[in-house]
Amino acid sequence: MMRPLERATMSDIADEPPSVPPPSTRASSARGQHPPRRKRDVHGWVVLDKPVGMTSTHAVAVVKRLLQAKKAGHAGTLDPLASGLLPIALGEATKTVPFVMDGRKAYQFTVGWGSQTDTDDTEGSVTATSDARPDEAAIAAVLPRFSGDIMQVPPRFSAIKIAGERAYDLARGGEIVELEARPVRIDRLTLVSHTPDHSVFEAECGKGTYVRAIARDLGLAIGCFGHVSALRRTRVGPFTTGRAVTLEDLQRNEQSAAQPAASKGVAAVLPVEAALEELPSVAVSRPDAARLARGQGVLLRGRDAPLIDGPLSVTCQGRLVAVADMAGGEIVPRRVFNLSGGF
């Protein structure tokens, strides 16, 4: 079953500081066996092109192991049956996860016509069928209903909580799950190709939008039923497919004998600030950077002070210092980064 595209939480982020090996490990090392590889500090983003059939949690674990990273988490679950972009934050980059998840997302997906399922994808049981099939004109006629700010009912098999329990747990237990419609934004929904039984679409949308629900509602609007039969994510916030790497790329890098262990995989890791490219940026002096690093606010004065209100990234001599909020010329740090060197 496809699981929904949900916000990551800090529980998605694994933090494993290095520890002294237990006696059994030291003994096995003494007998000539290889001890576990020591974790290292890796800070930045890996934009993984996740294959079909792998959970997001498993993908994070594999990347974390290949890069020997201490800390990793992902910016938004991608269903096992879906492929495409899964941005994985490493080290200090985990502090920027919300800024990626709040960004726009883009998908290419295929709708299978003529049947509706309880999961709104191919994993579920068929709940309704129709012999009718839409033509391109019928699809074009309903597409305007799925643009802009709309109300959308999430799939019953989703991670939304009802009285403290996940909707998919209740649905799997046989309970009738009724979810309320929520406001979402769809900036673009276009028909790419069409056959009698399947249509391929591209969508750009905001957070909280369920592609499975789009497919379901398209089928209902046309009167022939529909479900997602294939899904690929092509953009998450500032990250696009042009910056993606595959697990095979990372594995080849990890196995390369020409590279020292400390540098393996580094070429695939984007800097922490790559997640903040859609935010305005302000450069400050070293004394101001030191204040921000201590969690203190900084007031910018003078005619050259930037006129910015809202979130921004702060740098000093080309290095990322903090993500902050600015109002009335004052910068108040929201998240401070502990990268190499001090101010």
Image (spheres, rainbow, N blue to C red):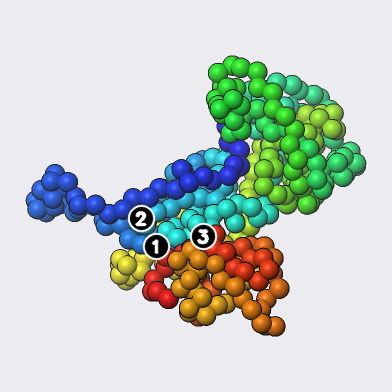
| Circle 2: element type | loop
Is 40 placed left or right of 163 in the picture? left
Residue at point 59%, 30% (across, down): 161
Among the two numbered marks 3 and 1 on one chain, the one whose residue lies closer to the N terminus? 1
Residue 110 image-quadrant placement: top right
Is 332 placed left or right of 22 in the picture? right
| Circle 1: element type | loop
Q: Position of residue 149 (x, y in %)?
A: 80, 45
Q: Is residue 123 visible?
A: no
Q: Nearer the viewer, residue 66 or 17?
A: 17
Asked whether the beta carbons under mark 3 and mark 1 sit within 8 Å of each other, the answer is: no
Badge 2 is on which residue? 70
Name the amino acid type tagged 2: Lys
Asked whether the beta carbons under mark 2 and mark 1 sit within 8 Å of each other, the answer is: yes
| Circle 3: element type | strand
Is 126 placed left or right of 189 in the picture? left
**Label drawn at residue 42:** 1
